[in-house]
Amino acid sequence: MKKLLFAMTFCPIAICMVVVVSTPVRVWAHGVAGKRFFPTTLSIEDPFVSDELSFIFSFLKEAGEGDHPPTKEYELEAEYTKRITPHFGISIGDAFLILDPEGEDTETGFGNLEVGAKYQFFLNAPHEAVASIGVNVEIQDTGNREVEAEPFTTISPALFFGKGLGDLPESLKYLRPLAITGVIGPNFPTDSETVTTHVDEDTGEIEREVERNPNTLSYGFSIQYSLQYLQTYVKDLGLPTPFDRMIILVEFPFETCLDRSCGGDTTGFVNPGVIWFGKYIQLGAEVQIPINDRSGENVGVLAIIHFFIDDLFPNSFGRPIFR
Amino acid sequence: MLCGPMFLSTWLGVAWGHVFPEHSDPQVGATVTVSPTSVRIRFDGALEPVFSTLRVQDASGKQVDNGDGHVDPSDPTLLEVSLPSLPPGTYRVIWSVVARDGHRTEGDYTFTIE
């Protein structure tokens, strides 16, 4: 199963073989603000609206806690986003999970379906700045309970932003390839608590277990250094392929519990990695390092293969529905 | 991680969608001792000639090229403009191009004549 999951991650490479000859239409490239290309990041969402398809593979070994043994968690997440207008888009996504607890049976299944919408309300090309607002909804009971899909819906509005440092003065030109992206937004579960009941096999009594579902705040940012930007706009260092299309980055995703007995508790990771981007696809990989014991004890890995649908199919379903 | 993009670079050829410069002459950030006769930028994809421009400015922002920026008719990936003899100083090359799939990209860089 694990091999199948790993293979499923990379089989979509076959889609890269499709080349579309198109009639040119003057549109701005996705993920571009002025000279800056902002890639799709792995841990936090990027600030752009675009036509794209992403597959993110992750592996993390969760530490045991209480009755729960240490568990290897494999996840393959897929998300498709579609522009309705040039600045407004919708998304749909889901994940397939394999939970492999020590000494127990492996569970597999899908997570809850997630749908979202995003509107890019700000773009300043000379200053390489962009901002969007959006909302994501995780729909209850659309996944498998065996892989801990939640029995409640979660609504998550968010603000996204990105800023490239290409407008730094000449004296700081080697910092111009830097860029920062970020996101912040609350997560509101529609049920404040989840009640499960089961019958005690020994006593026959019905036992009631209450799990609180807190409101949380998700926030994070990425710091990126683009070798492509350095090579193209600052100093030609003669970097060969594929380094001339690479972006080195560190992502910092965090989540803080706001109420219901866990107020103030924060989990998060530091995820250093690298991204390569071409015409039709983007590849990336990161290491996932927990910031505290609450976040975990082990280092995980993330990998992405991302398709630029607007480049693959610029004159059909790769362009906005309304232009 | 490196095998993936290198393999795909070969498989997909050099034609990137939202095109970016592959090589510039004078090179980005270079210092040259002789005034160049032209600026040439080769992109990693074919350009739409009508929508692609190239100009050169001096440090004061004055345009100093010969006004003949164009995509090479025999090589749609090459954007060039001719230059008169220029005095020492720092110059800015400003380009704006549209790829064959319609995506626009733009940028600039400097070079210095000693």
Image: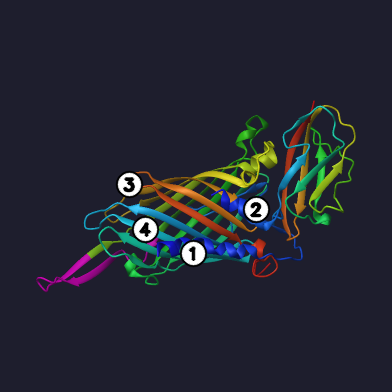
Q: Which residue is mark 1?
A: A8
**Amino acid type for the residue under numbered disc 2:** Ser
- Per the model, the C-alpha gap separating discs 3 and 2 is 38 Å
What is the count of numbered marks?
Answer: 4
Chain-order first, disc 4 or disc 3: 4
Three-letter amino acid code of the residue under disc 3? Glu
Mark 1 residue element = helix
Q: For this rendering, which residue is in front, A167 or A290?
A: A290
Above or below A254: residue B102: below
**Do the CB atoms of the residues marked 3 and 2 lie less than 8 Å apart?**
no
Image position, residue A313 (x, y; %): 67, 66
Nearer to us: label 3 or label 1 = 1
Which disc number belongs to residue B35?
A: none
For mark 2, name the chain. B
Residues beneath discs 2 and 4 located on the same chain:
no
Left or right: A24 as drawn, with respect to A140: right
Where residue B104 sits: x, y (%)?
72, 54
Q: Characterize the local packing of mark 2: few (<14), some (14-19) or many (20 or more) Cα atoms within 10 angstroms.
A: some
Q: Which residue is mark 4?
A: A73
Residue at the disc numbered 2: B9
Let me know if residue A198 is in the magenta part. Answer: yes
